[in-house]
Every structure is written in structure tokens, then in C-alpha cells.
Image (tube, rainbow, N blue to C red):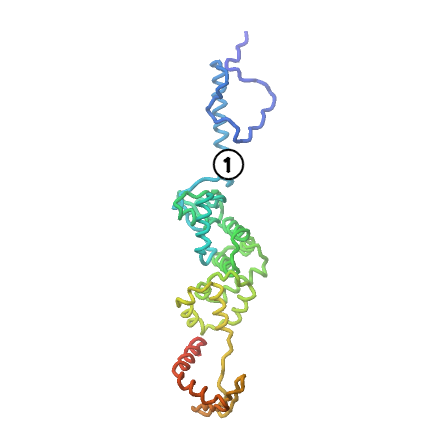
Amino acid sequence: MARKNLIEVSESTAPLRPAETLSASRPIAGLVPSNTRHASPVGGIAKTLGNITQKVERANDLERQMAEGHTVIELDTSLIDASIVRDRLEMDAVELAQLVEQIRDHGQQVPILVRPHPDAKERYQVAYGHRRLAAVSQLGLKVRAVVRKLSDDELVVSQGQENNARTNLSFIERALFAARLEDRSFSREVIMSALGVDKSALSKLIGVVRAIPFELIEAIGPAPEVGRRRWMDLVEAIKPSAIPSLLSHLAQADLKSESSDARFQFVFRELTKKETKAPPSGQTGRWEAADRLVSATTKASGTTYTLALRNKGAAGFGGWIAGNLERLYETYRSEKAKTGD
């Protein structure tokens, strides 16, 4: 007499159905709906085996989603470090404050992308989302993040492509990002992919950064309204001897408080303004005011320079010059210092 199949496991040779896709409606593993009939001991064993299988499926599915970066988790912001390559010159305080208010009112709608830190166990490294990370950190919240295993190449490509699509880096920030990637020995192909540019455009980006001292670029700032053409014009106008004077001016409070675009314009004006040169020794020059009330003749001879004023306004204008000689001389010295002469 044949033995019965005591645990009622089917011996059918029909193919098994594919595992179900996880969904929100799927019962939680280990819970039995209230309307389920009391099963026999043998049926209970089969259900227990099914629940174990279901739990394993769910664990495997979660592990797969984490590896592929499909799962959003919450992380302590203190466990997250910046990207291996900086992409911004500065974080706009006004924009950051607006983002903080936005997240306070509506929550963090878009997760950041991080990878497990390659050199520090149980830490992470940002691919993109530095501003969101800073805003959430200010609020003292955990940051919503997608964790994905990324190589260095994959990280910088993700970072660059997200910036292209979302944060609108200025021309000079893109140029600096490209140069920094090259300095870290990333291939030109990876850099082009990160920035979405061809070889010619990449060469121009990197060329600008190589031609202008980094200290000057940093002092000017991101200059969001200044495009490629103006930065390349600045490259043509650069005078190494003028850099110390420019940096000194840019460090002063009045210029530091100006916008980055205004600081660029100041530097460009200083480098491109035409100098007024004295006539050669022994030669004379002539000048007349637009209203024709004053005219002047000049003569340079050795260590002597003569200025003679004539016409109706000559006395008044001459008296004003005489009363302002000290200020005029200081202005002259300041202009000479700027040009490095």
C-alpha cells in the first residue's frame, strides 16, 4: 500500500508561476487575514513554508532595489560627506534660505543621490543634492536619499548631468568643474559625458581656467550672467602684473558686497581701460573742453611738463586744479598701481 503524501505537497510537473511583483496590496509576511479558515496542522506547515519563502523573496527584492538605487531611505546628515569634486564656487545664501522654507513647509520632495563612502565604513558620499543636504541639515532633519553603488566615473557623471538638468551652474563653475575633473585624472570622455559637451567646448572650458589665476576667479565668484564669450575676452585682457592690485581691490568691503557679476565687470574694466600717455619729450599737445570755455596746451621737455590754460574759463578751472592737486596726484598714483606701471 502506497504511503500518503502526509504534508500534501503537490507533485505536479506543471511549471511554477513567476514570483509576484511586490505591491502595496500584498499581505504583510507572517500575518493571516481574519477571515481565513482554521487550517489543519498539515495545512499550517505548508502556510509556514509559504510565509518563509515570501519573507526571503521580500528581503531579496529589497536588497536588489537598494543595490540598483530604487529605494529611498532616510539618513542622518552627519553621516554624509561632500562629493569628491566640488562643482560650485559658492552656495547662494538667499536661494538656500528659500529652499529651507520650502522643505520646512512641504517636506523634501526630491531625494539626493549618495553612494557608500569608498574609504569610510558606514558613511556616505554625495553624488548630487548638496543644497538639499545643506537645507535639511539646517532644519535638523534626516535627509531622504537614494543609495547606489557608484564608481568614481559614475559619480561625477551623475553629478554633472544632474547639475546640467537642475541647478544651472554658471559658465565659470562648469569650467572649474571640468578642470578639477581633469586634475583628478578623469578621462576626457568621462568629463564630456558629465558636462554634456563635445571636445571643442571642453577645451574652451578648461582653457579659460588655465589662463586665469584661480585666486582671481574665486574673488570674482560664479558670475551667473557672464557667459563664455566674456570670460574668453577676459583671458585676452589678463595682465599678470595687474593681478595683485585686482585681488587687493576685490578684497575691500565695498566690492565684496557687490554681486559677483558686478565684480567681473570691475575686473574687466580695469584690465581693458585705455591709459592716457604723456606726449613724447619736446612735443606739445592741445585740448579743448566741449563747451569751448577752456582750452589747454601741454608740453613735455625732459623732467618738465607744462600745462597752459586759456579762454574764458581758464582762471576758474586753473584755480580748481591748483586746489585739488593733492587729490589728483593720489588718483594718479592709484591708477598707476592698478596697471602695474
Q: Residue 326's x, y, as percent?
A: 38, 82
Q: Residue 316's x, y, as percent?
A: 45, 87
When the figure is inspected, residue 161 is found, relative to residue 69, above or below; the finding is below
As drawn, the residue found furthest toward the right would be 14
Is 319 displayed left or right of 288 in the figure?
Answer: left
Q: How many marks?
A: 1
Q: Residue 216's x, y, as percent?
A: 45, 66
Q: Residue 282's x, y, as percent?
A: 49, 92
Name the residue carrying label 1: 64
Of residues 290 and 183, the one drawn nearer to the viewer in this rendering: 290
Seen at 52% across and 89% down, the residue is 286
When the figure is inspected, residue 21 is found, relative to residue 227, above or below; the finding is above
* Quarter of the image that includes the C terminus: bottom left
When the figure is inspected, residue 218 is found, relative to residue 3, above or below; the finding is below
As drawn, the residue found furthest toward the top would be 1
Q: Amino acid at mark 1?
A: Arg
* Quarter of the image that includes the N terminus: top right
Give the crowd class for mark 1: few <14, some 14-19, many >=20 residues within 10 Å.
few
Is 22 displayed left or right of 120 in the figure?
Answer: right
Seen at 42% across and 85% down, the residue is 320
Of residues 44 and 218, the one drawn nearer to the viewer in this rendering: 218
Instruction: Say what secondary structure mark 1 lies in.
Output: helix
